[in-house]
Image (cartoon, rainbow, N blue to C red):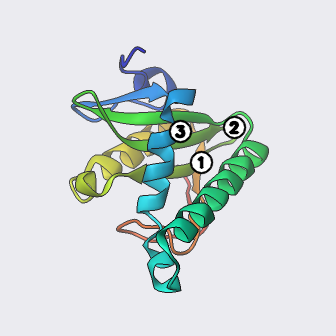
């Protein structure tokens, strides 16, 4: 699978050292683990580990189905640094707006500016095309900055 920089043709210029590649079927295990890592809220449920895994698998499948139903033309990319998958970027490019549907990074790559650079580059890409950026973040999502139905007009 190629890990050539694709952001320049899809979203804008990638941050230094970051490559985006299209999601493929082989990424499901990584994407589920990434999703599960963001769901530390289930620890407080008092469930057995098998119950937690079953619940998270159900939630992950439901979320992916919702993304596919609500954003059928969205592009799902894997964020790669030094050949290693470290995150996900899901962007729906519409005629009047570009919607950041989902962005997630593994814990050890959070807080180092990768996510900020990806979002900044996406905003600049939209501004160059005179489109709005829309970002819908569900409450409880793990990220340094929590926004709900955030929209930036450029």
> Where 31 falls versus 7 (above or below)?
below
- Local crowd size for mark 3, using a 10 Å CA cut-off: few (<14), some (14–19), many (≥20): few
Marking on residue 132: 1
- Residue 99 seen by the camera: yes
Circle nearer the viewer, 2 or 1:
2
Under circle 2, the secondary element is loop
**How many labels, in total?**
3
For marks 2 and 3, give the CA distance: 26 Å
Q: Nearer the viewer, residue 66 or 97?
A: 66
Under circle 3, the secondary element is helix
Residue 41 is situated, as x and y percent measured from the top left of the image, at 48, 77
Point out the tag, 2 or 3, that comes first from the N-terminus. 3
Query: Which residue occupies 43% across, 67% down?
Result: 142
> Where 134 falls versus 137 (above or below)?
above
Query: Which residue occupies 28% across, 47% down?
Result: 114
Marking on residue 94: 2
Circle nearer the viewer, 2 or 3:
3
Marking on residue 28: 3
Marking on residue 124: none
């Amino acid at each position: 699978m190629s890990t050539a920089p694709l952001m320049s043709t899809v979203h804008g210029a990638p941050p230094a050292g970051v490559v985006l590649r299209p999601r493929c079927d082989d990424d499901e295990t990584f994407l589920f683990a990434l999703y599960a890592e963001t769901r530390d809220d289930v620890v407080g449920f008092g469930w057995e580990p098998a119950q937690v895994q079953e619940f998270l698998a159900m939630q992950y499948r439901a979320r992916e189905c919702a993304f596919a139903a609500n954003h059928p033309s969205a592009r799902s990319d894997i964020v790669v640094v030094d050949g290693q998958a470290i995150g996900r970027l899901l962007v729906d490019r519409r005629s009047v707006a570009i919607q950041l549907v989902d962005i997630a990074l593994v814990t050890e790559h959070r807080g180092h500016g990768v996510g900020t650079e990806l979002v900044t580059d996406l905003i600049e890409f939209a501004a160059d095309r005179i489109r709005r950026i829309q970002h819908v973040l569900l409450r409880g999502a793990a990220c340094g900055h929590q926004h709900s139905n955030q929209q930036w007009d450029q």
